[in-house]
Image (spheres, rainbow, N blue to C red):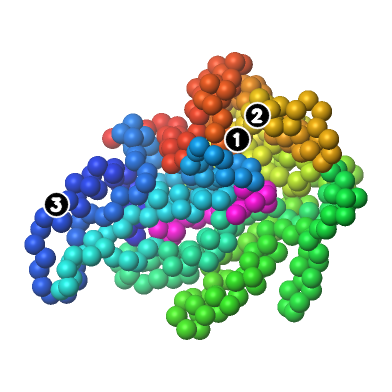
Amino acid sequence: MSIIADLIKRRISRRTFIKATGFAAAASVLPGPARTVVGGTPGGLIIPPGVRDYNTRLVLLGTTGGVSWWPGTNRASTSSALVVGDAVYVVDLGQGTTNRLAQTFNWGKWIDTPGGRIEDGSSIFLQAVKALFFTHLHQDHTADYPNLLLIGPGAGLGSYTDPVTNERSRVPLKVFGPCNRGKLEEDKSEYLQRNGTIIPTITYEPYSSTQTPGTREMTELIWQAFAQTINDMTLDNGYPDFTALIDVKEIGPYDNEVLLPMPEGWSDPNAEPCPHITPFVVYSDDKVEVKATLVNHHQVFPAFAFRFDTNDGSVVISGDTGRDTSWNLQELAAGADILVHEVIDPAWIEQKFGPKPEPPMDALKEHMYASHTTIADAGVVARECGVRTLVLNHIVPGNTPRAHLMQAKRRFYGKLIIGEDLMQIGVGSKRSI
């Protein structure tokens, strides 16, 4: 078992690691070949004693959203991880969240060498990550995806190390995300009328860009944008083929790898971005089954919510969505243990835009209300879903006062958790001893 898998399975606390590393530091350094010393560097995640006994845990890596860095808060943008035994499943990678991922799971190990006691510089913590899911392709959910692709190969991305032979083999990370939208959104802000320009389509061999790229095209264009450094890493430094370390599968209605079951007669994402659909399976393995449905983040299409069902319990992540999802979210999340739901503070919207903003701010204010969920309405949705616990996430603005966030309790009678970066929550029942 790799060190990261072992640590996840054992649920070693930060205090235990500090004690272990302190003991190792006090020991004399013996000459001779390098050998592993018990202990390691603690990550940023401190596992609460009550949560440590859960086989399945939800980790909030980043808990804000929006195209900004909010003053007065150090929240990273949106990302969540579900830990099931020794496996990790990640949803979204907004700005700052690959650092949070490393803080959480990148535990080191100390070794003695003839030159002194050092920490092994090798990192393989990403071997524990089995799949990555994108709810949609806005930048506050994808900005750290290039970081994962470019830095991840040095941290075990898409690989497996045999615990007996220590040989490494390739096991590509599965990446699931929205397909190419197929057509541009309507110009609701009159951007083009104000002589605005949109990103053009440029063709260059062997790639052809698009104005509405899906997950696969986004990935290929990242490879192209950073081709110089990637080629240097493989030709000069002996790194593996970066592009072979992930396996992208798009979700969509256009003959994609994971078929989105749109209703008969549907044809236009601008006219109907969130019709009622039946939840459908996106991924499954021996630890988890993942289902998805459409949510209403108009004009984004497709935008998804995901449900993770494990033997211990179930977690639903709403993605970005307005209050009305044609009952899709309520159907997907029915009876779940935990609903992680986005929220936006209406007091902030009114202060920012005023009662009747002029163009183009009127379009942005409309988007804020129609494509996001107010704090109080998130509680209503949670009640309609019949979930036990509501976790507030994608908190906009990131510095929303706690008193405002408590409005979610007005019409929700279960447990309310205000999400914080690196917070973790036990799912279902504790392990039997």
Q: Secondary structure at mark 2?
A: helix
Label placed on residue 397: 1
Foreground: 59 or 373? 373
Q: Quadrant of residue 37?
A: bottom left
Contact, CB < 8 Å: mark 2 with mark 1?
Answer: yes
Magenta stretch? Answer: 125-143
Residue type at mark 3 is Phe
Q: Residues within 10 Å of mark 2 (few under 14, many from 20)?
A: few
Residue type at mark 1 is Pro
Q: Residue at coordinates 34% horizontally, 60% vertically from top-left?
A: 2
Mark 2–mark 1 Cα distance, whole angstroms, equals: 7 Å
Residue type at mark 2 is Trp
Q: Earlier in the sequence, mark 2 or mark 1?
A: 2
Mark 2–mark 3 Cα distance, whole angstroms, equals: 50 Å
Q: Residues within 10 Å of mark 3 (few under 14, many from 20)?
A: few
Mark 3–mark 1 Cα distance, whole angstroms, equals: 44 Å
Where is 246 relative to 432, above or below? below
Q: Residue at coordinates 61% horizontally, 53% vertically from top-left?
A: 142
Q: Position of residue 201 (x, y in %)?
A: 81, 66
Front position among marks 3 and 1: 1
Residue 301 vs residue 419: left or right? right
Could you tell me which quadrant the N terminus lies in?
bottom left
- Which residue was labeled with disc 2? 348
Residue 320 vs residue 55: left or right? right
- Which residue was labeled with disc 3? 23
Where is 339 relative to 195, above or below? above
Foreground: 60 or 157? 60
